[in-house]
Amino acid sequence: MTPGKLLKTNLLLLALLLIGPVVAFGQTAPLTATLQLSPDTTLPGTPVAFMITITNPGEQLAKIANALSLKVTTSSSVFDAKGQMSRDTVTLPLDQMERIGTGGIYELTIPPRSQRTLYIDIGPGLSDNEFFVDHRLSFPGVYDLQAELNSFVAGSATTTAVRTNPARLTIETPAGVDADAWAFLLAQTDGKGWGVYEWITAGEGIAGALRSKFPKSRYLMWVAGMGRNRSLQATLDDVNAALAVSPPPALRDDLLWVKAAALATSSGNALITQRDIDKAVSLADQARTVYATLKDSAISSYLRNIAAAELVHLYTHRTAEETLRMLLEDAPPTPEHVVPQVNCVTKGDGQAFSARFGYTNPNHVSKTITISNLNQVTPAPRDQGQPKIFKPGAHANIFTANSPGGNLTWHLDGSKAVASPDFPIECQALSTP
C-alpha cells in the first residue's frame, strides 16, 4: 500500500472512531425516546399526561408516524392499552405535528442532532389522553407504562419501532371521602371502571354531583374546570379553590387554561354585547396575567407557545375602542318604534263602549312584538286580539277591544293609545271588499 493510500485509510478509520455510534457506514443512529408522566401518582379514574421526548442523534432527518401504542406491565399481567373503539394505537396530537400536503396525513419530523417533545394532555374535561379509555388503567395499583412510536426515513416504507423507558404510574387506594367518591363513580358503571369515555359522556353532570356530595374530596380539583353554563364567578371560584391545593403540574396548567379562557371569553362578551370597554379591558387584564403565568411556567413548551400566542389577542384600551368603533359602524340601524292609534269608538249602554285600534310601523320591514308589557291592552284581558306581527306602513281598524266603563289603553312598543267613551270619532260600519 502506498503512503498516500495508507494515510487516507487511517483518516477514514479515525473519522469512524470519532463519529462512533452516531453514523457508521452511512447508517443513522437509532432514535431514542423518554416518557414522563404528570402526575405519576393519582386517584382512581383520573388520567395523567404523557410527555414524550424524542432524540435524533443522527445526521439525517427522521420522521415519526402518526400512531402511538402503550404497553402496560403490572405485577400479574402485561397488556396493550386500548384507545377508543378498542384500537391498539391512538393518533398523536395533530396540532403538534406537520400536515403532509392537502390530505389527512400527519407526521412529526425530528431534525438531525435535535429533540422534539410530544405532549399528550389530560385536558380540562379529563378526556385528552385516549389511553385512559381503558378501564384497566382506572383501578388502584402499580403500572409500568411503555410507549411505542414508529420512525421512518423520508421516501422509505420501512418503519422502526421506537420504545420509551417504562414509566411507573401509581394509582392510589383512596381513603375516607375519596373512597366514597370513587365508590360513587364505580356505581355509575356497575363497577366496570371509570375513564375518558365516562368523563366525555357524563363528566359535566358527575362534576356537579361530586361537588354536591363530596365537597372535601380531592376529586374536586380534577373536575374544577367542568360545568357548562356556569357563571364566570362560579368557574373562577372552583378553579381558584383547586389551584390553592397545589394540583399536579399537568392539571394545574389545564385549570389555568380554563381560568384564562373564561376571563377572555367574558372580556369579549362585555365589549360585544354590553359595549362596556372598561369591563372588557379589566377582564382582559386578568386573563393576561393567567396566560403570562402559563407562558412562563407550563410544563410543556407546546402549552407555553400557545399561551404566548393567546396574549396578543386580548383587548387593551386602544384595541377595545377600535373594535367597538367598527362594531358600531357595521351595526344595522335600530328599528323605530311601532305607534298605536285609536281609530274610533262605538258607544254602548251607560259607560260601556268599544274601540277600534290601528298602528303605524315606520320601518321598512315587519316587526314582531309578542303579548307582553310591550303589547297589551289594559284593563285586562291584556290580549284582546291585537296583532303580534306589525307590517310596514299605516294600518287602521286592526282589532276591536271592549270596555264596560273607563278608558281602554293599548300599550305598544313603548307608546300607548287611550280610548275613552267621549272619543270624538264614532265608528262606522266597515265596508267589505
Image (cartoon, rainbow, N blue to C red):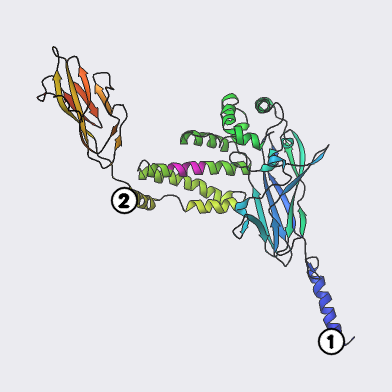
Label placed on residue 329: 2
Q: Is residue 210 visible in the rendered structure shown here?
A: yes
Q: Residues within 10 Å of mark 1 (few under 14, many from 20)?
A: few
Q: Nearer the viewer, mark 1 or mark 2?
A: 2
Which corner quadrant of the image does residue 182 belong to? top right
Residue furthest left in the image:
424
Q: Amino acid at mark 2?
A: Glu
Q: Amino acid at mark 1?
A: Gly
Q: In the image, is 66 to the left or to the right of 269?
A: right
Vertical comparison of 58 with 142: above or below: below
Tell me where residue 333 appears, x and y as whole percent.
28, 45
Tell me where residue 100 appears, x and y as whole percent.
62, 59
Q: Residues within 10 Å of mark 2 (few under 14, many from 20)?
A: few
Separation (CA) of disc 1 from disc 2: 82 Å
Decide which of tag 1 and tag 2 comes sooner along the chain. 1
Which is more toward the observer, 341 or 162?
341
Which corner quadrant of the image does residue 65 belong to? bottom right
Which is more toward the observer, 333 or 264?
333
> Is residue 262 highlighted in magenta?
yes
Q: In the image, is 237 to the left or to the right of 369?
A: right
Instruction: State which region is magenta.
Output: 259-266
Q: Quadrant of the C terminus?
A: top left
Vertical comparison of 150 with 134: above or below: below
Label placed on residue 4: 1
> Is residue 409 highlighted in magenta?
no
